[in-house]
Amino acid sequence: MPGSTLTVGLIGAAAVLTVGLATVGSASVLGQRLAGAADAAALAAADAASGAVTGVPCERAAEIAAVAGVALEACELDELVATVTVSARFGILPATASARAGPPS
């Protein structure tokens, strides 16, 4: 029976490792999704601030964030430079990402 105990232990360790790696992978995907949504929202706000598109800059950012399935936490304009922060939940943990967009300096 010592072989059976070892086999059960190895299977349990492999299961724990698999669940841990799946969780880390999911968190990484969420982080990339948030970063992309923040970039898109900042670009939309900067475009609206510059007049390239119509609308109120922070409202444009909120629209883009909503389409991406995240919440717009903050939107700040400094002339034509927009800085936005978006958030989403990963289980019970909050996750945020920020981005800045504007004309080249």
Image (cartoon, rainbow, N blue to C red):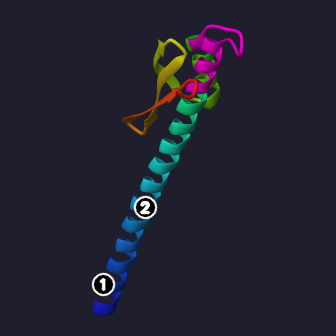
Task: State yes or no: residue 55 in magenta.
Answer: yes
User: CA separation, marks 1 and 2?
Assistant: 24 Å
Is 9 left, or right, of 27 in this rendering?
left
The prevailing secondary structure element of the residues shown in magenta is helix
- Residue 13, image x, y percentages: 35, 72
**Residue bearing the label numbered 2:** 21
Question: Would you place residue 29 above or below residue 74 in this image?
Answer: below
For the point 42% across and 55% down, which residue is it? 24
Q: Which amino acid does label 1 sit on?
A: Thr
Q: What residue type is labelled 2?
A: Leu
Task: State yes or no: residue 95 in magenta.
Answer: no
Task: Give the secondary structure at mark 2.
Answer: helix
- Residue 20, image x, y percentages: 39, 60
**Residue bearing the label numbered 1:** 5
Mark 1 Cα shell of 10 Å, populated few (<14), some (14-19), many (≥20): few
Mark 2 Cα shell of 10 Å, populated few (<14), some (14-19), many (≥20): few
Is 4 left, or right, of 58 in this rendering?
left
Quarter of the image that includes the N terminus: bottom left
